[in-house]
Image: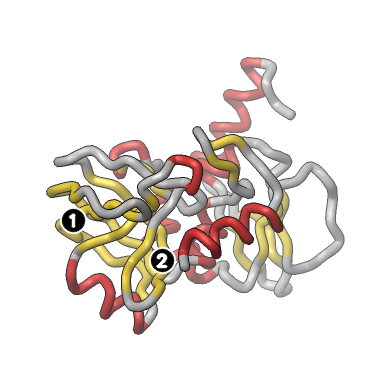
Amino acid sequence: MLICWLTLALLGAGWRAADACSCAPAHPQTQFCNSDFVIVGRVQKMFKGNEYYNAYKLKIRNVFKSSPKAAVALKSSRILTPSQDSFCGVTLRPRETYVITGTVHQLQAHVNLCGLVSKWRDVTPRQRKGFRMLYKQGCTCKVHMTRRRTKSPNTCVTNFNECFESHGICLHDSKGKCRWTRAPALTRCFQSQRGNGTMT
């Protein structure tokens, strides 16, 4: 079922290279809002599955988001991922801690490269704050990975600038318009880019 769903999703989405599969680019806030669950977990063991799935046993340390079905699926502390690279399977290292966004199918937790899988030690302080509380507050906003300007009051655009990915959180302002919130880390990132001549 997941393989069919992934195939249709990949055909209907934009494309970006991700090893042997392709996924639409997405901001961490979008990944958070579109997922059934968001967790931080330490990998304990990997289980070779069948021709479709492998499984990982996790020690779940934090649950930042969980739908009712996800709460049931995560009780086993096990997540499934496609066993074939062509279907965006992920590879997790034992004893490493990750932040993971995923979906639930038939009361089982699934993760793939089109979601967000990142080592927790590599997650920026601003992203951690987003995962803990602020991304949820911004789920009524839309983050578009584009350089085009938009007049939509419910949209923030990234200009494909990595500063927005690492430090940007899109929230409604006092007038109800979605804007990138001010943050020292975001300002420093822009200043660094200007100093290096990489500002877009």
Residue 164 x %, y %: 59, 43
Q: Please give the name of the residue rendered at 15% of the width and 57% of the height, measured from the top-left corner.
A: 59
Q: Residues within 10 Å of mark 1 (few under 14, many from 20)?
A: many
Specify the quadrant that holds the C terminus: top right
Q: Please give the name of the residue rendered at 56% of the width and 32% of the height, measured from the top-left corner.
A: 189
Query: Given this view, does label 2 or label 1 mark the residue nearer the observer?
Result: 1
Viewer-proximal residue among 38 and 190: 38
Viewer-proximal residue among 90 and 95: 90
Viewer-proximal residue among 178 and 46: 46
Residue indicated by mark 1? 58
Q: Is residue 118 left or right of residue 167?
A: left
* N-terminal-most mark, 2 or 1: 1
Q: Amino acid at mark 2?
A: Met
For residue 30, which quarter of the picture?
Answer: bottom right
Residue 123 x %, y %: 37, 42
CA distance separating discs 2 and 1: 23 Å
Toward the bottom, the furthest residue is 68
Toward the top, the furthest residue is 196
Residue 145 x %, y %: 69, 48
Mark 2 lies on a secondary structure that is: helix
Q: Amino acid at mark 1?
A: Leu
Q: Is residue 117 visible?
A: yes
Q: Please give the name of the residue rendered at 26% of the width and 80% of the height, measured from the top-left corner.
A: 72
Callout 2–callout 1 Cβ contact below 8 Å = no
Residue indicated by mark 2? 133
Q: Please give the name of the residue rendered at 40% of the width and 73% of the height, measured from the top-left corner.
A: 105
Residue 2 x %, y %: 46, 64
Q: Residues within 10 Å of mark 2 (few under 14, many from 20)?
A: few
Mark 1 lies on a secondary structure that is: strand
